[in-house]
Image (spheres, helix red, strand yellow):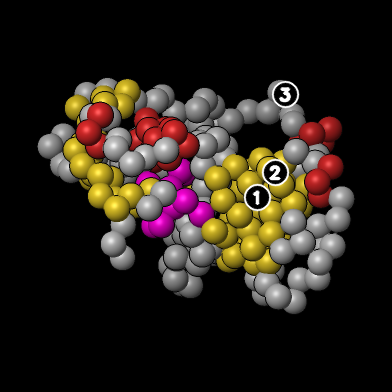
């Protein structure tokens, strides 16, 4: 297999990137096609509202598969078989994301609800078909519902220079709690790169307190 394109994303690193697609609708990006993909390869895709992105977990080294993992949804306290999870540490590093299709161009598609890091290699695209893929009676196992969101305190002085879209994105990312499952230090300060900003925060009970926001200088 070879990549047909790469992701341009608002997420500059793995930490802080949503664990599932669609959970942060404000997360926007593009799949930019390789030069060998001919114009017109997406002809007809604009008729669909959503698209599957088949991608490569290219931030996981080959040989790092784990047959048993501790899902964050279980607090990292219980092991499940890798095939019962969305863990990136798989025998083959293939991932699947369902995103909303915003626009189709000859050299790229624009999407929202993204959960992929900038530069992720894309292997394929497939249209979402509601009549077979929206199964009302499906069971969600140990992940039956969306994770509970935290409140976010974002001081006004740290919002300076942010547009409404960037503010909404950062707020939602922090609300869905990007911390690792094994967090037992309430005083720990976390940080990640979101939409060009290095954001640092800590969690107090059910609230996220934003401590600082600096422009990315990498």
Q: Are marks 1 and 3 in contact (CB under 8 Å)?
A: no
Q: Nearer the viewer, residue 28 or 70?
A: 28
**Magenta stretch bounds:** 9-19
Residue appearing at x 81%, y 57% in the figure: 42
Query: Residue at label 2?
Result: 101
Residue at 58% across, 30% down: 140
First along the sequence among labels 2 and 3: 2
Q: Is residue 36 above or below residue 182?
A: below
| Nearest to the observer: residue 26 or residue 189 | 26
Q: Which secondary structure, mark 3?
A: loop
* Circle 1: element type: strand
> Is residue 88 visible in the rendered structure shown here?
no
Question: Label 3: which residue?
Answer: 136
Q: CA distance from mark 2 to mark 3?
A: 22 Å
Horizontal side of 26 relative to 30 (left or right) equals: left
Q: Position of residue 187 (x, y in %)?
A: 12, 37
Q: Is residue 17 magenta?
A: yes
Q: Counting other residues with Cα less than 10 Å from the Cα at mark 2, is it few (<14), some (14-19), or many (20 or more)?
A: many
**Quadrant housing residue 122:** bottom right
Check whether the beta carbons of the residues at disc 2 and disc 1 lie within 8 A of each other.
yes
- Residue drawn at x 19%, y 27% is 204
Residue at 80% x, 41% y: name it. 48
Image quarter of residue 163 = top left
Return the mark for residue 110: 1
Instruction: Rate crowding at label 3 as few (under 14), some (14 to 19) or many (20 or more) other CA atoms within 10 Å.
Output: few
- The residue at the far left in this view is 187
State the quadrant of the N terminus: bottom right
Q: Can you give x and y, in whole percent of width and height, for residue 148 in the image?
A: 41, 24
For residue 135, the mark is: none
Q: Residues within 10 Å of mark 1 (few under 14, many from 20)?
A: some
**For the stretch drawn in magenta, what is the main secondary structure?**
loop
């Amino acid at each position: 297999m070879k990549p047909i394109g790469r992701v341009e994303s608002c997420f500059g690193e793995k930490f802080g990137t949503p664990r599932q697609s669609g959970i942060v609708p404000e997360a926007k990006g593009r799949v930019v096609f390789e030069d060998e993909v001919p114009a017109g390869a997406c002809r007809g895709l604009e008729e669909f509202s959503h698209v599957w992105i088949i991608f490569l977990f290219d931030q996981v080294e080959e040989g790092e598969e784990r047959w048993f993992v501790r899902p964050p949804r279980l607090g990292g306290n219980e092991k499940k078989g890798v095939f019962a999870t969305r863990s990136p540490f798989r025998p083959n590093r293939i991932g699947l994301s369902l995103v909303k299709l915003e626009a189709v161009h000859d050299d790229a598609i624009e999407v929202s609800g993204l959960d992929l890091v900038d530069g992720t290699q894309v292997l394929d695209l497939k249209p979402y078909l509601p009549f077979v893929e929206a199964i009302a009676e499906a069971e969600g196992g140990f992940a039956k519902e969306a994770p509970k969101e935290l409140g976010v305190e974002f001081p006004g002085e740290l919002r300076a220079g942010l547009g409404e879209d960037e503010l909404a994105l950062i707020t939602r990312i922090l609300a869905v709690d990007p911390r690792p499952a094994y967090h037992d230090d309430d005083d720990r300060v976390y940080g990640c790169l979101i939409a060009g900003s290095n954001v640092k925060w800590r969690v107090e009970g059910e609230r996220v307190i934003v401590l600082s926001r600096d422009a990315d200088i990498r």
